[in-house]
């Protein structure tokens, strides 16, 4: 297991297009988190899963955003009808409930032009 | 929402000096964690300190926690150019279902 993997690393898309990101967590971890980060800011929570159940969604997550974690393994985050304000780094992290620190992936940088 | 506030926002020191960053938070916590982020990359977990602990060490890192003042500090001793990064504190509030609440970070620059 080489840690949390995110794909793609970079994505440039035109406004109005749909994009999908993938996250492969550490296999032993039962929690998976999605965050968004803009320059000079800390991560903003978007949503998290415990196993395959999506337990919480931030108010930041408009109806254009949807996340899935089928079978409690990898997760996808889809943004429909992208807007320029969606440009950010999208970070995925995983953890084992109660064990402490999160392990982050390297992120997917989205640029909406 | 962001609970932690790091201080200072930016810090520039000479290689070999010690760097101290502070974090304040608002609610009672289960634990507090420090992370490092190199430019354009993901975050790396550095150290976790639980609410019943006052000090913790890991290599050149020393973290303190004062729950009465709701504050923590991260000390990096004998800084190196490779320590240049942004440092974030994140708290797990009590009764939060183990979710992290993040500050805005301290940008540390180590001058060679």
Image (cartoon, rainbow, N blue to C red):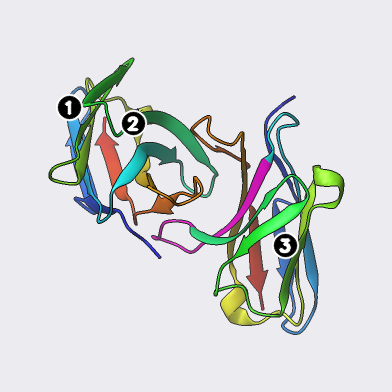
SS for tag 1? loop
Which numbered circle lies on residue B50? 2
Residues rendered magenta in the picture: A31-43
Residue at mark 1: B18
Q: Is A8 located above or below residue A14 in the figure?
A: above
Q: Is residue A34 magenta?
A: yes
SS for tag 2? strand
Task: Indicate the quadrant containing the C terminus of chain A: top left, top right, bottom left or bottom right.
Answer: bottom right
Q: Residues within 10 Å of mark 3 (few under 14, many from 20)?
A: some
Q: Is residue A23 magenta?
A: no
For image coordinates 34% across by 57% down, the residue present is B104
How far is the residue under mark 2 from the one under mark 3?
38 Å
Q: Residues within 10 Å of mark 2 (few under 14, many from 20)?
A: some
Label 3 marks a residue whose chain is A
Q: Quadrant of residue B76?
A: top left
**Which residue lies most toward the left here?**
B69
For image coordinates 53% across by 29% down, the residue present is A99
Taking the image as shown, residue B75 lies to the left or right of residue A83, namely left
Residue A27: x percent and y percent? 75, 31
For the residues carrying marks 2 and 3, which lies nearer the camera in this image? 2
SS for tag 3? strand
How far is the residue under mark 2 from the one under mark 1?
24 Å
**Which residue lies most toward the right here?**
A71
Residue A45: x percent and y percent? 53, 60
Residue at mark 3: A11
């Amino acid at each position: 297991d080489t840690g949390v993997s995110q794909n793609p690393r970079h994505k440039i898309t035109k406004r109005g297009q749909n994009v999908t990101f993938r996250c492969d967590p550490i296999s032993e971890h039962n929690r998976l988190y999605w965050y968004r980060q803009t320059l000079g800011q800390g991560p903003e929570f978007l949503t998290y899963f415990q196993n395959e159940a999506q337990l919480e969604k931030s108010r930041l997550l408009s109806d254009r955003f949807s996340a899935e974690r089928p079978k409690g393994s990898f997760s996808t985050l889809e943004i429909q009808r992208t807007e320029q304000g969606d440009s950010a780094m999208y970070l995925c992290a995983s953890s084992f409930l109660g064990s402490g620190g999160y392990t982050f992936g390297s992120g997917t940088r989205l640029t909406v032009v | 929402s962001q609970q932690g506030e790091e201080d200072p926002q930016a810090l520039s020191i000479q290689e070999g000096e010690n760097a101290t960053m502070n974090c304040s938070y608002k609610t009672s916590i289960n634990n507090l964690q420090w992370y490092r982020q190199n430019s354009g990359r993901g975050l790396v977990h550095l150290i976790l300190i639980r609410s019943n602990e006052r000090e913790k060490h890991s290599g050149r890192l020393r973290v303190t926690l004062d729950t009465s003042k709701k504050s923590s500090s991260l000390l990096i001793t004998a800084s190196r150019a490779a320590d240049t990064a942004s440092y974030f504190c994140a708290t797990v509030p009590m009764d939060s279902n183990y979710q992290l609440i993040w500050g805005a970070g301290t940008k540390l620059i180590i001058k060679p």
